[in-house]
Amino acid sequence: MHSSTKPAGQTGKAQGSQASARNWLAAALAALIAGCATPPPPKPAPVPEPAPVPQPMPVAQIPVAPPLPGQVSEAKTAREYRLDAATHLYQKNRSRIYSGKMPPLLYAVGVLQVDIDGRGMVTDIRWMRAPTQAPEVMADIERSVRSASPYPAPVKLGRVTYTDTWLWHKSGRFQLDSLTEGQM
């Protein structure tokens, strides 16, 4: 009898290779389908916070104190300021101003230079011609100049050095050359 059966070893092999081909085909099909599927949308990238705008470095400024309450001088030169300072000194020393023309012979004559800061305060005084024969007059003039602070603030000049001549009578009264009524 002739049988059409294949040997047992061959049947298992053919079936095994068919199963393996099916498995391979299924895996390839799964990979193909997976490749065609739309991937989930990517997560939005976090929006970075804007970088802080660098602020300009503050410029160091020297503080300028405002003028003290009182008068302000609009003088543009030390010579113009000298008139403002003399008027101020006259107002502070009304009872000590010599009225009228000064006599030809004065007790003392002194030339004083005065430094005034932007607020009208006296910062320094210097004798250019000191009446050394009358030290009490020198002390009185220095005291009068310092006690008259604050002077009109020299707002257009910032600070000023002015010079004036003191004409001193033996009575203790005086005139300043910038406002003098002259001599006899």
Image (cartoon, rainbow, N blue to C red):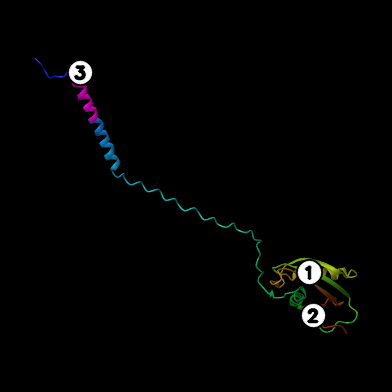
Q: Residue furthest left?
A: 1
Q: Residues within 10 Å of mark 1 (few under 14, many from 20)?
A: many
* 70 with respect to 114 (left or right): left
The amino acid pointed to by label 1 is Val
- Residue 159's disc is none
Nearest-to-viewer mark from 3 and 1: 3
| Residue type pointed to by label 3 | Gly
Residue 90 position (above or below residue 23): below
Q: Nearer the viewer, residue 83 or 10?
A: 10
Task: Kindly check if marks 3 and 2 are in contact, taking CB atoms under 8 A apart as contact.
Answer: no
Residue 176 visible in the snapshot = no
**Observer-nearest residue: 144 or 24?**
24
* Residue 15 on the magenta segment: yes
The residue segment tinted magenta is 8-21
Mark identifier at residue 114: 1
Between disc 3 and disc 2, whose residue precedes?
3
Total tally of numbered discs in the picture: 3
Residue type (three-letter) at the residue carrying disc 2: Leu
Q: Secondary structure at mark 1?
A: strand
Q: Earlier in the sequence, mark 2 or mark 1?
A: 1
Looking at the image, is 59 positioned above or below residue 6?
Answer: below
Q: Dot 2, crowdedness within 10 Å: few (<14), some or many (≥20)?
A: some
Q: Residue furthest top?
A: 1
Question: Which corner quadrant of the image does residue 92 belong to?
Answer: bottom right
Pick whichever of labels 3 and 1 is earlier in the sequence: 3
Residue tagged by mark 3?
A: 9
In the rendered image, residue 184, in percent from the top left (x then y), is placed at: 88, 85
Q: Which mark is residue 179?
A: 2
Q: CA distance from mark 3 to mark 2?
A: 142 Å
> How far is mark 3 from mark 1, CA to CA?
130 Å
**Magenta stretch, main secondary structure class:** helix
